[in-house]
Amino acid sequence: GENVEQHPSTLSVQEGDSAVIKCTYSDSASNYFPWYKQELGKRPQLIIDIRSNVGEKKDQRIAVTLNKTAKHFSLHITETQPEDSAVYFCAASRAQFYFGTGTSLTVIP
Amino acid sequence: EAGVTQFPSHSVIEKGQTVTLRCDPISGHDNLYWYRRVMGKEIKFLLHFVKESKQDESGMPNNRFLAERTGGTYSTLKVQPAELEDSGVYFCASSLVSGPGNTIYFGEGSWLTVV
């Protein structure tokens, strides 16, 4: 089955700095890679996704990159704000979704 | 539009007792998923319903877990008898379609603590 590893498990950055979260996956057949954000006490929500035929995707301050050869993908958040503080989960999917262990991001004002 | 709703939000039970978690998917979503997150670990897939049928139950840990989706609407996940290691957050999610690239929508989770 698929194995998704996510690093770091915790990340603290100063407001305005960038944050990068990295994930690797094992199943080369995985072709869809969403990122979910879970704020404290709330449900995980999709913030950005990328498909295997694309190398990079941007949405305002958030970007995701995918390296299919190396089987890794990353989430980049620029100009971080306190409201970006949350737990972020990466996932890899071919049929079912396989999630990483989550990264707790704290943005310090 | 109502999102995925789960009940109860929190449950504390003793080892050996039974707990039933309920999930109401987004209206019209044929696909319903159950996931579990143990503290600090990944959100782990348990099973997938398409309407009332179990499409994939490969993630169910053992036969103490029973999931049903009568009539293809809401779903229940029963744990009987509960063990300490069953503690965690149980997420339900739903999607309109299944397969690569579909978006799944999560509920807020049911926190289960077995003492």
Image (spheres, coloured by chain):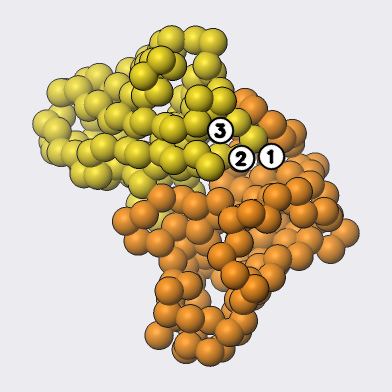
Chain colours: A yellow, B orange
What residue would you read off at disc 1? B95
Is there one chain holding both mark 1 and mark 2?
no
Q: Residue at x 49, y 19 (%)?
A: A50
Dots 2, 3 in contact, CB < 8 A: yes
Does A92 sit above or below residue A78?
below
| Mark 3 closeness class: few <14, some 14–19, many ≥20 residues within 10 Å | many
Does B57 sit above or below residue B26?
below
What residue would you read off at disc 2? A96
Percent of width and height locating residue B50? 79, 47
Q: Is residue B52 left or right of residue B25?
A: right
Is there one chain holding both mark 2 and mark 3?
yes
Percent of width and height locating residue A59? 42, 15
Q: Which of labels 1 and 2 is toward the front?
A: 2
**Chain identifier of the residue bearing label 3 in the image:** A
| Mark 1 closeness class: few <14, some 14–19, many ≥20 residues within 10 Å | many
Q: Quadrant of the C terminus of chain A?
A: top left
Q: Is residue A80 left or right of residue A45?
A: left
Q: Residue at x 68, y 55 (%)?
A: B57
**As shown in the figure, which amino acid type bears the numbered disc 2?**
Gln
Q: Residue at x 35, y 31 (%)?
A: A23
| Mark 2 closeness class: few <14, some 14–19, many ≥20 residues within 10 Å | some
Instruction: Say whether residue B108 is visible.
Output: no
Q: CA distance from mark 2 to mark 3?
A: 6 Å
What residue would you read off at disc 3? A93
Q: Residue at x 32, y 56 (%)?
A: B40
The residue lying furthest to the right in this view is: B71
- Residue B54 tag number: none
In-front residue for pair A29/B99? A29
Q: Which of labels 3 and 1 is toward the front?
A: 3
Total marks shown come to 3
Is there one chain holding both mark 3 and mark 1?
no
Q: Which image quarter: residue B28?
A: top right
